[in-house]
Image (cartoon, rainbow, N blue to C red):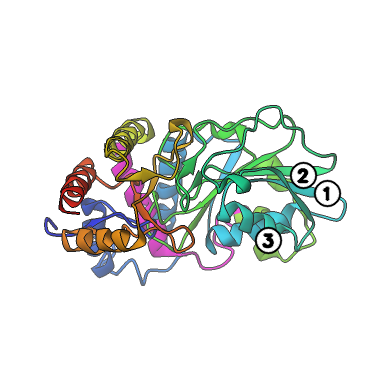
Amino acid sequence: MANRPVNFSPGPSILAPSVLEEAARAVLALDDVGLSILEISHRSATFEKILADARDGLRRLMGVPETHDILFLQGGARGQFAQLALNFLTPGVSGAYVDTGEWARYAMEEGKFLGGTYALASSKEQGYAVLPPLAGLTVKEGTRYVHTTSNNTIYGTQFQELPDFGATPHICDMSSDILSRPVDVSRFAMIYGGAQKNAGPSGVTLVVIDKAFMESGRKDIPKIWQYRVQAAKDSMFNTPPTFAIYAVGLVTKWLEAQGGVEGIAKVNEQKARLLYDAIDGSGGYYRANVAAWEHRSRMNVTWRLASEDLEKAFVAESKAAGLSNLKGHRNAGGIRASLYNQLPMAGVERLVEFMAAFKKAH
């Protein structure tokens, strides 16, 4: 796999070679049963162990307390935008949302179908290039929860610390930085995220939810959308995404071998600093979209060049050099490099070398 391009995709994202190799073998046959992971029954003892191993790996890595359940669902973060509101919003109560980008705004818009929502804070007027201050905010009476988005893939901002909101339950979309750094899970009523950036392939959505908060949800909605039903059925009320869950288990084992979340957080910080230093040290040739280090994402680094034509040339020439998926989001433009857990430091070093050569040539 030495000749593969370096994959800076924002998701589905890069997977470690050892994870890909083990997954490829399992697609042909699992050692203990001789059948493919794609064809075993989700009711089999083999899959029950796969599910338990993935859950246990996540619990160890994230330090999930016994007060919280871990669910493997489907529908991605967009599905959770709706399922969250469906479970916890009723007439007379509302959800407060911290608007830090398009995904946060999408979450708030979904909630409007099921109850009142409002922006507790927003950085929209600043083009989402900064994060709004959250300290000292007061939620409105009747607020059921506060929803935040920890990392913003499009604009390249990330909360380095998320505050408590007092007695109001805190929900956090961690789709793009889950497992990338230590988090005190006990502070959150619910954490959710698609697996396809740091935790595995697309197809499974991770939900970590406080059991008491879960039980406080509505019981007058279809069972498949109730978190409590999914928990009671061990994430198998409907047929789960068996292969994606298997791959999540492989990723947890890989991550534990890297020193766990604490170990990978140090590497992620080093990768991000190397790239930001190259941008900041270019004499203005490359211009970071986010100026303040404390607001800068360690996962998604975004920057601009002097013109769109130059940016198109950068994307084309970087692809030819074996650096793939560096084009910025269609709504933001520019360049974006996603530095998720399984992207090695060597990949960032290659990108920095290319950036220097491109600047010299153009």
State the SS at label 1.
loop
Kind of residue indicated by mark 1: Val
Figure quadrant of residue 277: top left
Report, in whole angstroms, how far the alpha carbon at label 3 lies from the one at label 2.
15 Å
In reply to whether residue 164 is colored magenta, the answer given is: no
Report, in whole angstroms, how far the alpha carbon at label 1 lies from the one at label 3.
15 Å
Residue range corresponding to the magenta coloring: 231-256
**Left or right placement of residue 313 versus residue 175 in this view:** left
Q: Position of residue 162 (x, y in %)?
A: 57, 33
Q: Where is mark 2, residue-wise?
A: 144
Q: Residues within 10 Å of mark 2 (few under 14, many from 20)?
A: many
Q: Residues within 10 Å of mark 1 (few under 14, many from 20)?
A: some
Kind of residue indicated by mark 2: Arg
Q: Position of residue 37 (x, y in %)?
A: 33, 66
Q: Where is mark 3, residue-wise?
A: 110
Q: Position of residue 24 (x, y in %)?
A: 24, 64
